[in-house]
Amino acid sequence: MSEYVAEHVQDGPGVRTPNGVLRGALKDDVASFLGIPYAQAPVGALRFRAPEPAEPWEGIREATAFGATAPKRPYAPPLDALLPDPEVAGDDCLNLNVWTPWPAAGPGDGGPGDGGRAVMVWIHGGSLIHGSSAVPVYDGTAFARDGVVLVSVNYRLGIEGFGVFPDAPANLGLRDQIAALTWVRENIAAFGGDPDRVTVFGESAGAISIAALLASPLAKGLFRRAVIQSGAPSARSIDVARRTTEAIAARLKVPATAEAFAGVDPERLLAAQTAVTGKGNPVLSGHAFHIAVDGDVLPDHPGDLLADGASADVELLMGTNTDEYRLWFVPGGHTERVGSLAQRFLLRKGRISPRVAKVYREGRPQEKPGEVLGVLAADKLLRIPQNMLADYRLAGRTAATYLYEFGWPSPVLGLRACHALELGFVFDTLDLPETRALTGPDAPRALATAMHAAWVAFAKTGDPGWRPWDPARPVMTFGPGVPSLVEAPREAERRAWEI
């Protein structure tokens, strides 16, 4: 146990860390400590630079409100009504939050060595330009209620976190995440957590980040388990990743250098970033920010590194939602507007073989061309790479790998089991209005109980409660109906990508 221990300070729960004393809030035997700096504010001389450790403070630091969020713009309509994205002003955006059972001191949950409770670190999604740890859906109370220390992290977004410049390090947002995980390793024992039992988990861009962390030599040893929700290993070469930076520079009429960008008014920079990236989406592409193969954080593409055995000792849980694409296609009307001709054009643009598309069309004769296009694109981006990674890990005799699929259909706008719908179930936050914006008012509580319990069990033991990946391809399906294990779902479509 760390020499820095949990204690009680006047009017609230307190924790003494190497940087100073924190005072949080207490409710129903769960203590929350919000807005804790893990690195210095990335402004001034530290803008477009690797994160520097946070500085100590004098006296007691209040930790009862979320810290500043990274510079960003809200989601564009109509997604803004479905995906809450609060903004908290301030420069100190490199902060994190901790929810922990209280009192934090004492024995853990019976894990190896009983050095404290299992820890989960949440990395939010948002296409690397949206999101924060302050999203209400990500409240960590239910995890702490069930004996897990929950940490959620902010990191730099957009051009500040994933711009590619000749005069600045690449992947600053990933470097922020590594700095936060380093903070967890050095500090979490003071909150009752076991630094040797850390699970990182994230969704969408957060899941892509975790795949990169699994492959990065700089993150080695910082976590023991990982959960990838609706994401897969993905990165671009430096030259390709630089294109979005260059497009923003052209719009601003400045050189594509960190020095030049540092001189641009932040609001003007955000406006240019939004103009350049606003017309794309993860399925139909367009200008976007990417994790870059930079030779440092990522020596090679994360998929190749993981296939070659990176993080072979890390237990892995990953999965997708049945109707991922509908979050982007349905509100924007793409399912209705895309006809057969447009489908074929977009398939060519996305480099999806006509032979593969034929298998999907024949298996879905009643679905519109836009629906088939969406399923194809989502499978190419998510389900197929996850299956490939699971197969690589099985062949390499790695730690256990588990797959899931979330299939409960939301009635909201006909979104069905769309991207991000599982979040309120994983966090067991179905009662929040921000969750209900996507789920509607009658989401099945029993399904949330089961899914949340699986994540807790995985963090504590490495086993979410079903058979690990094997040649029969077992996938735990969460809805519709009760959770059930299915072997090789939609196998004909999956096999079409192998030929």
Image: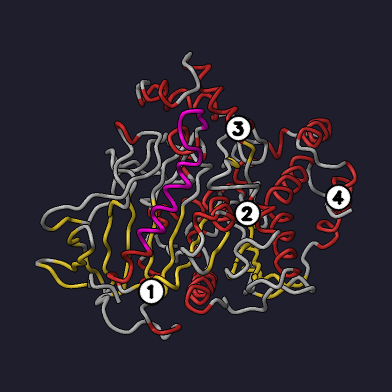
Quarter residue 349 falls in: top right
Report the magenta residues as a range.
Answer: 164-184
Mark positioned earlier in the residue sequence (1 or 4)? 1
Mark positioned earlier in the residue sequence (2 or 3)? 3
Q: Position of residue 293 (x, y in %)?
A: 60, 42
Identity, as a three-letter code, of the amino acid under mark 2: Arg
Identity, as a three-letter code, of the amino acid under mark 4: Pro
Query: How many angstroms separate mark 2 from mark 1 (CA)?
Result: 38 Å
What residue lies at 35% left-to-right and 22% top-to-bottom? 265
Query: How many angstroms separate mark 3 from mark 1 (CA)?
Result: 41 Å
Callout in the foreground (3, 1) = 1
486 to 203, vertically: above or below = below
Q: Toward the viewer: 166 or 117?
A: 166
Are there few (<14), some (14-19), or many (20+) residues within 10 Å of tag 4? few
Mark positioned earlier in the residue sequence (3 or 1)? 1
Q: Position of residue 44 (x, y in %)?
A: 29, 31
